[in-house]
Image (spheres, helix red, strand yellow):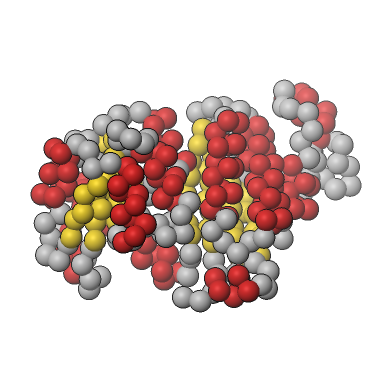
Amino acid sequence: MPDTLADRIETRERSVNLLVIDHDLRHVTNVLRMNRSPGARTTVGRSGSAGLEWARQHQPDLIVLSMELYDINGFDLCRLLRADSRTAAIPIIMVTSLDDTDVRHRGMRVGANVHLMRPYTLAEFEDAVERALSWAHRLSVEGLRIEVELELESRTEYLLEVNDFLVELCQQTPLSRDQVMRLRQAFLEIGLNAIEWGNRSRVEAAVRVAFRAFGDRVEVEVIDQGAGFDLNNLPHAANRDDPLQHLDVREQLGLREGGFGLLIARGLVDELSYEEGGSHARLVMRLRSTPAAAQWLVP
């Protein structure tokens, strides 16, 4: 196994084009010092807008993004990068000086691959670069066009934020507007179930979300931290024979009225499946045969 960043870069048989987006000259200098591997190239964007424009034009191999920028919030810039087809597959290392769990979760909500807290060591930097580049390599090997992994606390407002972001990601794919809206609603139903039924609205319990676009389909996974449920004995709306049975159960647990999420979601997407006792849901929307889909398949 390669032991240094230089070795890791050489095993990929190409130079690494690194973009650093940060106005802090001390941090920029630190990255330049750490990234002096043979063949490595580093470009600096002193503002969020300048970094975004350069990334769109040149598609670097890796972005080191500061959370603290003068002109745009680092979270918002990360979201813009992920929502643009020209930059969606570029791995992003988010750098922050704040040691706060909510900040890290917020970064995950907009799709940062790795987080580094300042000050960090050379070993930590090398490990972050390796993890980020390995993610990009896996996308290429597995035929993934887009992959964004997110994490959010069990708050409805965060779920709505992620839901809007997923729409932006879907718009990069050949899914029709109707398919996007159906997937959006299905995700909202499953996400609310994860928060209210799986995590029982415990704010500290995270919900993990993964968005993946392949050549023939789009998948959204939702994973909660609950104990799961018996898929063959569901005392709520997923019971097709008695869809109202769940109302008394949810009232006893203090959950919202309604709760037909599973039935609704099943009718909105091409496939809804569960793993790990119900705490891991997967929504699938298959791409229709259209000229846009045919173009999507072209490498």
Q: Position of residue 197 (x, y in %)?
A: 67, 34
Q: In front here: 164 or 119?
A: 164
**Relative to 84, is 237 above or below?**
above
Q: Position of residue 279 (x, y in %)?
A: 61, 44
Quarter-of-image position of residue 285:
bottom right
**Relative to 163, is 2 above or below?**
below
Question: Residue 229: in sight, yes or no?
Answer: no
Q: Position of residue 5 (x, y in %)?
A: 17, 59
Q: Is residue 267 toward the left or the right of residue 192 in the image?
A: right
Q: Position of residue 220 (x, y in %)?
A: 59, 53
Which residue lies at the image location 73% right of the left edge and 49% below the top edge? Answer: 265
Q: In front here: 25 or 4?
A: 25
Q: Is residue 268 toward the left or the right of residue 158 in the image?
A: right
Which residue lies at the image location 63% right of the left edge and 61% below the top edge? Answer: 175
Q: How many marks?
A: 0
Which residue lies at the image location 20% right of the left edge and 67% below the top edge? Answer: 15
Quarter-of-image position of residue 252:
top right
Q: Is residue 234 toward the left or the right of residue 103 in the image?
A: right
Which residue lies at the image location 48% right of the left edge and 51% below the top edge? Answer: 83
Q: In front here: 142 or 183?
A: 183
Looking at this rendering, what residue extends furthest in the right direction? Answer: 241
